[in-house]
Image (spheres, rainbow, N blue to C red):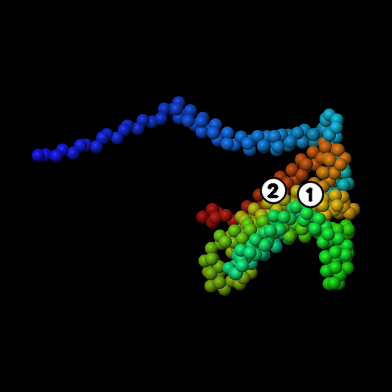
Amino acid sequence: MTLVKDSPPDAPEIRPEAPAAKKRRGRRENLAGYLFMSPWIAGFLLLTAGPMAASLYFAFTDYNLFNSPKWIGFDNFTKMFHDPRWQKSVEVTAKYVVIGTPLKLLLALGVALLLAQSRRGQAFYRAAFYAPSLIGASVSVGFVWRALFSDDAVVDRTQSFLGFHTGGWVGDPNWVLYSLVALTVWQFGAPMVIFLAGLKQVPRELYEAAEVDGAGPFRRFWNITLPMISPVLFFNVLLETIHSFQIFGSAYVVSNATCGPADATLVYTCYLYQKGFRESQMGFASAMAWMLLLAVALVTAVLFWSQKRWVHYEEDAR
C-alpha cells in the first residue's frame, strides 16, 4: 500500500494595499497623532504663541493695562535707549552674566572631575552637590540668602574674623551683586551632572596612552579631557548663559523688592517688572521683553558661530 502525503496548502497571495486604503490609513494615524498632541498644541497657542504675538503688538503701542492700546510706532524703543535706568539694567545684567556664568561652570567642572573618580560614597556626594540646583530658585532660599549676607550676619562675622571689614553685602551697592553671583554659583549641580556624564564617555585608553608618553595631569586635561567633552561644555555654556539673562527671583527677593540699593541689583527683568506691573507701562515693558529676546538670540548665534572653532565632534574626526 502506498502512502501519499498531502501537499501543503498554497500560501495566500499577498496583494499590495490599494493607494486609497493606504491613504486612509495614513490619515487615521496622523489624526491619532494630532489628538495626542492637542493638549500641548492648545497650551502652546494659548499660553506661549498668543501672549508673544500680543506683546509684540503692545511693544509698538502706549498701553497702561487700563486703557485701549494706542499705536506709537518705535517710540518705546527710542525712549528705552535714552533711559538711564534701562542702560543701568543692561550694565548690571551683563556684569552678572560675565562673572557668574564662568565661575559657575568652572566650579561645576572641577567638582565633576573629582566625582568622576571612583571613591566611597560617590552617590551621596553627587546627590548632595546636586540638591542646591533643585531648591536654589525658590523664594525661601532668597530670604535665607538675604539673611546670610545682611549686616552682622554669618558672612559679615566671618569676614570680620578673617580681617575683612566690608559689612553686610546686601546693604552695600558695591557688594550686593556679588551675593547674587554667589547664589548662582552655589547652584552648580545641574551643569555638574552634565559634565559628569560627558567625562564618563571619555575612553580610558586615551589617558593610558598619554601616561605612557609622559603627559602630566594638566596636559592630559588640556589635550584629552577638554576636547573630548567640548560638546558638553558648549551645551552648558549655552544653557547657563541664557539662564543668567533671565535672572529675576533672587535679585527681587535679596533686594527686598527694590532692585537696590542704588539700583545695584537692577537686572533687566527686574526693571521690566517695575515698568510693566508697578508703573503700568505695559507697552514699554513689552518692548523691553523683545529687546531681551533679541539680545539672547544674538548671544546664542555668536556661541553657535564660535563653536566651530573649539567644539570637536566625533564626526569631525572621521
Q: Residue at x 35, y 32 (%)?
A: 14
Q: Residue furthest right?
A: 262
Residue of label 2: 300
Answer with the quarter of the image where residue 159 lies. bottom right
- Identify the amino acid type marked 2: Thr
Question: Which x, y percent locates residue 60?
Answer: 81, 34
Q: Residue at x 82, y 52 (%)?
A: 253
Give me the disc on residue 248: 1
Answer with the quarter of the image where residue 149 lies. bottom right
- Identify the amino acid type marked 1: Phe
The kind of secondary structure element at disc 2 is helix
Question: Which x, y percent locates residue 127?
Answer: 65, 61
Q: Residues within 10 Å of mark 1 (few under 14, many from 20)?
A: many
Q: Residue at x 54, y 53 (%)?
A: 315
Left or right of 119? Residue 107 is: right
Question: Which x, y percent locates residue 9?
Answer: 26, 35
Quarter of the image for the N terminus: give it: top left
Left or right of 160? Residue 123 is: left
Q: Residue at x 83, y 59 (%)?
A: 147
Q: Compare residues 10 and 127 and report the one nearer the observer.
A: 127
Answer with the quarter of the image where residue 75 lies. top right
Q: Is residue 72 visible?
A: no
